[in-house]
Image: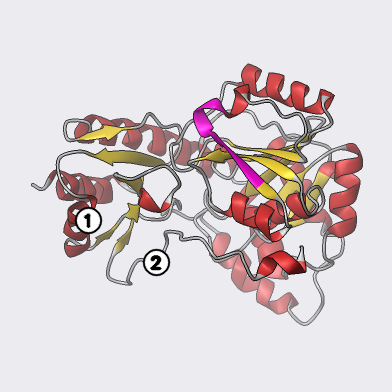
């Protein structure tokens, strides 16, 4: 991190701040948790009198199996954002340029600026056509947040090859890829993949994730990673959850089914962006955005004001939750 840049970099807004009485649609978190995960967490308390294992072999083994890679390529991190920061810290120097998609997760540009770099923004729909030459890093969010766009694998691999030929590593944030049946690019040469466990498994407070990289990039991530950077509960619960394949399959089926229902219901009043993620981006065209947010709030539903994303000026983003909750949201959004 560049000390001279810290004072000029502000924090970015996020969802996930619903009141206790509200249903949380502003953060894209699975409302379900794998059966047995809470028991694993409680049992981990008995091990808090000792340091977590270093390296955390069982967590690494579970992560490697989860994305089908060699365990040597897995770098544990306390959440996906920590993997993103580690990747940027080990590739970006003061004055460097980084290709950043927009609209997308605001922390990419923030982390680049904290390193003293420049975020060179590209429309997220055009990121794979961008020229990665002369950039220290290129970032892709797949599926993209907040649009839900999932990128064609062949086009993504072609972009990686162009980047690799030009000496530019690619950071692919796959925080929401687990909600789909798409294959990860983890283990691809020239790619650093960042994965979050807490969204798919409904535990954002756990702070568990990992990065995957090969070659020199893997070596730099491993050297820079802090020792004991995940606590024992995160390691044990994270490893357990990654092995719950039936839970993952059921979640994917529910998300796809509910996303289709919600799209069909809402497109009569909103411009709904096609999505492969556990959320929908809605363009508000018939009334002020504030009126939509306030109406949902009155009905006990917290949704995301997507105007906080770069380039969006009339949008909200809504998560996909349980069927009965989604029906409540549809009624509020449609004002019925």
Can see residue 197? no
Q: Position of residue 320 (x, y in %)?
A: 36, 45
Query: In which image quadrant can residue 198 be found?
Result: bottom right
Residue beneath label 1, please? 290
Q: Nearer the viewer, residue 70 or 99?
A: 99
Location of residue 334 with respect to 13 vertically, above or below = above
- Determine whether the residue tagged by mark 2 lies in a helix, strand or loop: loop
Residue positioned 74% across, 47% down in the render: 211
Residue 80 lies left or right of residue 248; in this view the side is: right
Q: Which residues are magenta?
A: 119-126
Residue 303 lies left or right of residue 111; in this view the side is: left
Furthest residue toward left: 336
Residue beneath label 2, please? 17
Residue 114 lies left or right of residue 316; in this view the side is: right
- Determine whether the residue tagged by mark 1 lies in a helix, strand or loop: helix
Disc on the earlier residue, 1 or 2:
2
| Residue 122 magenta-highlighted | yes
Q: Nearer the viewer, residue 140 or 134?
A: 134
Local crowd at mark 1 within 10 Å, few (<14), some, or many (≥20)? few
């Amino acid at each position: 991190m560049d000390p001279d840049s810290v004072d000029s970099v502000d924090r970015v807004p996020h969802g996930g701040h619903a009141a206790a009485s509200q249903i949380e649609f502003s953060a894209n978190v699975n409302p379900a948790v794998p059966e047995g995960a809470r028991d694993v967490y409680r049992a981990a308390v008995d091990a808090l009198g000792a340091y977590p294992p270093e390296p955390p072999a069982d967590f690494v083994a579970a992560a490697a199996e989860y994305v089908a890679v060699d365990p040597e390529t897995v770098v544990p991190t306390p959440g996906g954002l920590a993997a993103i920061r580690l990747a940027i810290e080990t590739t970006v120097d003061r004055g460097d340029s980084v290709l950043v998609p927009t609209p997308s997760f605001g922390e990419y540009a923030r982390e680049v600026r904290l390193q003293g770099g420049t975020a060179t923004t590209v429309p997220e729909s055009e990121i794979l056509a961008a020229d990665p030459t002369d950039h220290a890093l290129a970032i892709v969010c797949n599926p993209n947040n907040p649009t839900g766009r999932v990128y064609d694998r062949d086009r993504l691999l072609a972009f990686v090859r162009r980047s690799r030929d030009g000496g530019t590593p690619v950071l692919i944030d796959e925080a929401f890829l687990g909600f789909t049946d798409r294959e990860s690019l983890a283990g691809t040469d020239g790619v650093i993949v960042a994965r979050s466990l807490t969204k798919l498994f409904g535990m954002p407070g756990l702070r568990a994730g990992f990065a995957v990289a090969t070659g020199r990039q893997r070596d730099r991530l491993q050297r820079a990673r802090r020792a004991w950077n995940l606590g024992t509960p995160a390691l044990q619960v994270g490893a357990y959850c990654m092995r719950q394949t039936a839970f993952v399959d059921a979640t994917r089926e529910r998300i796809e089914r509910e996303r289709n229902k919600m799209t069909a219901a809402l497109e009569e009043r909103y411009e709904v962006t096609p999505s492969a993620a556990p959320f929908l981006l809605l363009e508000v065209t018939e009334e002020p955005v504030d009126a939509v947010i306030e109406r949902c709030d009155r009905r006990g539903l917290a949704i995301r004001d997507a105007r906080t994303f770069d380039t969006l000026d009339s949008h909200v983003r809504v998560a996909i939750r349980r069927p009965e909750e989604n029906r409540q949201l549809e009624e509020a959004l449609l004002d019925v």
